[in-house]
Image (cartoon, grey):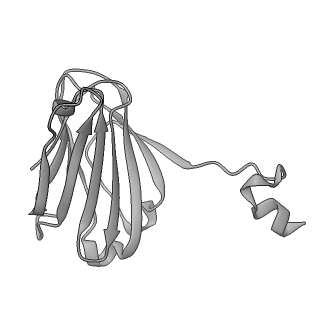
Amino acid sequence: MRSAYLEQNSGSSDLKLKYEQIAAARTLTAADSGKVFGVNQASAYEITLPLAATAGAGWHCKFVLSTVASNAVTIANNTDEDTIVGVTVGADASAGSSAESAVDEIVFISGAALGDQVEIFCNGINYFAKALAHDVAHVTIS
């Protein structure tokens, strides 16, 4: 019975993703791995990732713009390191931004649209980010 509960496709389980709304500055921890964060743009603030070594290999999360306003929200690595590598893709088919070497931040800019999102995965050394937006300019990596 327990194995049936743990199997997502068994019909016995009610597994849900861990979800949390963010509307103000926040520093994430290793325990935040696996969460989906709703991002609220009602004010400008920064979400800080844990040190990559502290987060560890396999740490991951997702940020989805859930409340649109005119403020930029930044996802940044710890100030002690430059560890973000990634790419943005837009549904508008424009060329996105990318960072092939480690940089500081990902930004949901003013003008971003509901549902724009960023997935982040850590290998213990770098954070690998993939951003998907309605318009490729809505999310920047630099």
Q: Residue at x 40, y 67 (%)?
A: 59
Q: Is residue 122 visible?
A: yes
Residue nearest the viewer, comparing 13 with 86: 86
Residue 62: x, y in percent?
40, 49
Residue 43: x, y in percent?
22, 29
Q: Residue furthest front?
A: 93
Which image quarter: residue 67? Answer: top left
Q: Is residue 76 visible?
A: no
Q: Is residue 127 left or right of residue 56?
A: left
Q: Is residue 32 above or below residue 97?
A: below
Q: Residue at x 35, y 62 (%)?
A: 121
Which image quarter: residue 65? Answer: top left
Q: Is residue 11 above or below residue 45?
A: below
Residue nearest the viewer, comparing 87 with 52: 87
Residue 21: x, y in percent?
43, 39
Q: Is residue 19 above or below residue 78?
A: above
Residue nearest the viewer, comparing 87 with 138: 87
Q: Is residue 66 left or right of residue 43?
A: right
Q: Is residue 76 left or right of residue 115?
A: left
